[in-house]
């Protein structure tokens, strides 16, 4: 029945070839124009699981809290012993002014030695004294510089705004509402920060600038977008050359390459028309669309050339090619599209947009490659050299046939299945070490700082690919604060955040967290109260406690930093500074907070809620991915299995196609665990998308194998014939795509290099699994007589 449907569709489409091709050209022109308007975007809202309880808790208090979207500009002195010299302080003042003027920066929340909100205070015999850290009448003289040094020591900012070794200081700026409708323009902000770095490092040779923050990290990733495009076009050119060498036909190689590239244009055009943008994580999608399109295009050219070698005219060869590949091609592409859509269950904007973009891209391949490629070749035909190559190959055994056909024999088939079972076992065992989230310090999307493993000189200027993580390490090594902050929200009744029961509970939580591995420090309203009480009582440590006298606590609040409570004193945030944002660290800290909250939360006193800060976002994202990764993968396989079952009406077909695919997924997870690559926003889609590419191989091979079995051939003979045509195309596609993406390992973006390694493995292993394990399974599952009986029925 499917054969009659394919024949009818082929007849109808090929009878109106000129109309179809004209519509194709018109659509390409329109969508090409739309694609030119696509924008690169890193809206932080797309990177946050907005439905997660942590983020919902933050949104409830977003007017009083920050999501951790801030920037620290660290100005380091490289020549003098410390920062207390006129040239450094002049540079710091000018840089502070530059940061203050940046678009997207909240001008009310900037801290530097030159801002009025950074003050010192002390208790003397005459009472309280205090003032701005920069002395009144500062003129750069030795006397005012010595006053500045004294004020810094009295300010409590050593380790926070001033380095522990006094060789650098920080300009700390909070950005405007990251989740608001008018978010920060991250690329522009990151570019301006780089301009500040370049300008003042040139102007002041004694100064080196380090910049840390979520926006800067995202900006650095986006700045490498041009390089990602370069890798894409290099891969495109390489695949075109290899395709030409394999087919020995310029017209068919160019047809497949151009139509596959047009699929990318259509995908970007449709995405742009729908109002979507692309981000650093979805930049993988255009290549995957191109790869899948090439995979199907190679099958079409290979089949058409074989028909041409039998003496058919270009039109007949093209029509028969479409007719024979329509069903397996449609099944494979629909499986890919629906499989990619399963990523949508993960409540992270970038992943959901990636799922939509990938599904759209695969859907358009049905037109650009499955329909248009054979139509174009119906006019162009294939070269005589390509036909002669196929005719010569028919007279001798193909290398693939000699290598893989033997796996249809029971002894080797049984051994292969045993090896596959062992592979499943080893993969499952090794993948137990697979972690959720980041496994490295700093920004794992970018390359680690070489100075972590070597003693870099003072003032060392790293290469751009290492710069951000070098800056993070500089902050962590020289300051008592960390770039990774988890904020716990302590909600109290109005005007009750400074009551003794609330403060004491906060203090108990602080003590608990300080004893959790991975916590550097905890800053709270209670810790500030102890310090202020001490200062108010001649510095006596006996007073480093929380008074039970409410009047004393009210008096303390007049000196309390406003970042430690909100306007109506109904929120007391707990700032937890972490060693890093590794998954294990976040799990330990959030578990400790959740356990404490379960035991001590009291609506009448204080309730602790997780979480804000950049580490809070990371924790929410990790938990979202952990909860959905296996359901998502199970849904992918369920969808693919159902579609294969519908297409071939055989459980045996499902087993033969899915088992090799599952082995690839398991081994890929084992490889990730071995290489220290965690499951996160950047890598989770690769696992799902690899399934989509791999299923194409199995469907095409099984379809051709079933065709020969229905003709009455024994399994080994049928598989030999399959390897001469479809099998050869699968091998070429797998090797070519793997060669194309292996060069991603040289990318300046580490997560692209990681994806290149994973995709190379998946392309090759999916190919091997389809060519080796599928026939071994078929040896015990497929029977030629049964296949022929089904055909006759």
Image (tube, rainbow, N blue to C red):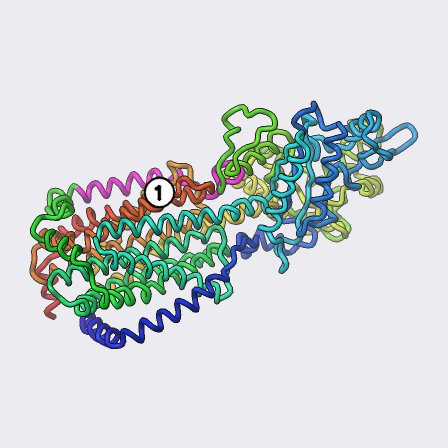
Identify which residue, 215 or 461, lies in the foreground.
461
Residue 678 position (above or below residue 64): above
Identify which residue, 209 or 360, lies in the foreground.
209
On the image, which quarter does residue 331 sit in?
A: bottom left
Residue 791 is situated, as x and y percent measured from the top left of the image, at 12, 67
Residue 736 is situated, as x and y percent measured from the top left of the image, at 28, 48
Answer few, some or many: residues within 10 Å of disc 1's Cα (few below 14, many 20 plus, some between 14 and 19): some
Identify which residue, 770 or 113, lies in the foreground.
113
On the image, which quarter does residue 9 sit in?
A: bottom left
Residue 319 position (above or below residue 587): below
Q: Is residue 428 magenta?
A: yes
Q: Is residue 656 visible?
A: no
Q: Residue at x 11, y 57 (%)?
A: 783
Residue 790 is situated, as x and y percent measured from the top left of the image, at 13, 66
Q: Residue at x 78, y 27 (%)?
A: 149
Q: Residue at x 28, y 43 (%)?
A: 424
Give the extent of the magenta segment: 416-444
Residue at which label 1 appears: 742
Q: Locate residue 789 relative to residue 428 in the image: left or right.
A: left
């Amino acid at each position: 029945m499917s054969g009659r449907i394919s024949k009818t569709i082929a007849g109808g489409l090929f009878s109106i070839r000129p109309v179809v091709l004209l519509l194709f050209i018109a659509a390409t022109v329109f969508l090409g124009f739309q694609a030119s308007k696509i924008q690169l975007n890193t809206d932080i809202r797309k990177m946050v699981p907005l439905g997660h309880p942590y983020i919902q808790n933050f949104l409830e208090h977003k007017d009083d809290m920050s999501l951790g979207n801030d920037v620290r500009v660290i100005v380091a002195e490289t020549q003098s012993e410390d920062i207390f010299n006129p040239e450094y302080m002049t540079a710091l003042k000018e840089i502070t002014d530059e940061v203050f003027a940046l678009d997207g920066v909240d001008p009310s929340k900037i801290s530097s030695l030159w801002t009025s909100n950074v003050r010192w205070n002390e208790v003397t015999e005459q009472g309280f004294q205090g003032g701005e850290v920069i002395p009144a009448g500062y003129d750069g003289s030795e006397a005012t510089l010595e006053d500045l040094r004294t004020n810094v020591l009295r300010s409590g900012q050593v380790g926070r705004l001033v380095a522990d070794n006094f060789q650098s200081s920080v300009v700390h700026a909070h950005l405007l509402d990251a989740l608001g409708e008018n978010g920060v323009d991250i690329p522009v902000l990151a570019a301006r920060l780089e301009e500040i770095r370049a300008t003042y490092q040139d102007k002041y040779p004694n100064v080196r600038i380090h910049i840390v923050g979520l926006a800067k990290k995202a900006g650095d990733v986006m700045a490498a977008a041009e390089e990602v495009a370069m890798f894409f076009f290099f891969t495109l050119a390489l695949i075109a050359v290899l395709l030409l060498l394999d087919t020995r036909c310029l017209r068919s190689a160019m047809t497949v390459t151009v139509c596959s590239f047009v699929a990318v244009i259509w995908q970007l055009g449709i995405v742009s028309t729908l109002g979507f943008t692309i981000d650093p994580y979805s930049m993988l999608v255009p290549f995957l669309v191109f790869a899948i399109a090439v995979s199907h295009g190679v099958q079409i050219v290979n089949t058409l050339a074989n028909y041409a070698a039998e003496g058919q005219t270009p039109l007949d060869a093209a029509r028969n090619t479409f007719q024979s590949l329509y069903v397996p091609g449609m099944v494979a592409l629909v499986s890919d599209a629906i499989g990619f859509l399963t990523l949508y269950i993960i409540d992270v904007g970038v992943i959901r947009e990636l799922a939509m973009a990938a599904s759209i891209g695969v859907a358009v391949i049905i037109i650009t490659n499955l329909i248009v490629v054979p139509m174009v070749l119906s006019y162009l035909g294939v070269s005589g050299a390509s036909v002669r190559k196929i005719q010569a190959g028919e007279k001798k055994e193909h290398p693939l046939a000699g290598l893989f056909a033997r796996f249809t024999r029971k002894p080797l088939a049984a051994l292969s299945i045993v090896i596959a079972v062992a592979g499943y076992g080893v993969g499952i065992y090794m993948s137990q070490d697979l972690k959720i989230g980041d496994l490295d310090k700093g920004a794992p999307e970018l390359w680690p700082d070489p100075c972590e493993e070597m003693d870099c000189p003072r003032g060392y200027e790293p290469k751009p690919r290492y710069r951000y993580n070098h800056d993070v390490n500089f902050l962590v090594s020289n300051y008592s604060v960390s770039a990774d902050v988890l904020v716990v929200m302590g909600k109290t009744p109005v005007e009750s955040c400074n009551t003794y029961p609330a403060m004491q509970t906060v203090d108990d939580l602080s003590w608990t967290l300080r004893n959790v591995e991975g916590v550097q420090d905890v800053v709270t309203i209670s810790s500030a109260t102890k310090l202020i009480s001490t200062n108010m009582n001649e510095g006596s440590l006996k007073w480093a406690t929380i008074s039970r006298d409410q009047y004393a606590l009210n008096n303390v609040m007049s000196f309390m930093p406003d970042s430690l409570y909100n306007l109506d004193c109904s929120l007391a945030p707990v700032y937890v500074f972490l060693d890093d944002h590794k998954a294990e660290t976040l799990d330990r800290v959030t578990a400790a907070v959740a356990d404490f909250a379960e035991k001590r939360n009291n609506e009448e006193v204080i309730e602790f809620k997780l979480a804000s800060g950049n580490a809070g976002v990371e924790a929410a994202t990790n938990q979202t991915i952990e909860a959905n990764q296996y359901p998502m993968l199970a849904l992918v396989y369920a969808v693919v299995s159902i579609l294969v079952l519908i297409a071939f009406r055989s459980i045996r077909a499902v087993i033969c196609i899915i088992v090799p695919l599952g082995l690839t997924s398991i081994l890929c997870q084992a490889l990730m665990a071995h290489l220290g690559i965690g499951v996160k926003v950047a890598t989770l889609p690769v696992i799902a998308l690899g399934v989509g590419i791999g299923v194409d191989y199995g469907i095409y091979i099984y379809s051709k194998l079933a065709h020969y079995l229905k003709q009455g051939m024994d399994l080994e003979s049928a598989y030999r014939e399959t390897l001469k045509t479809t099998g050869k195309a699968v091998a070429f596609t797998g090797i070519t795509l793997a060669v194309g993406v292996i060069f991603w390992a040289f990318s300046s973006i580490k997560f692209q290099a990681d994806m290149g390694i994973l995709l190379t493995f998946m392309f090759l292993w999916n190919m091997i699994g389809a060519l080796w394990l599928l026939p071994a399974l078929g040896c015990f599952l497929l029977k030629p007589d049964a296949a022929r009986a089904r055909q006759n029925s």
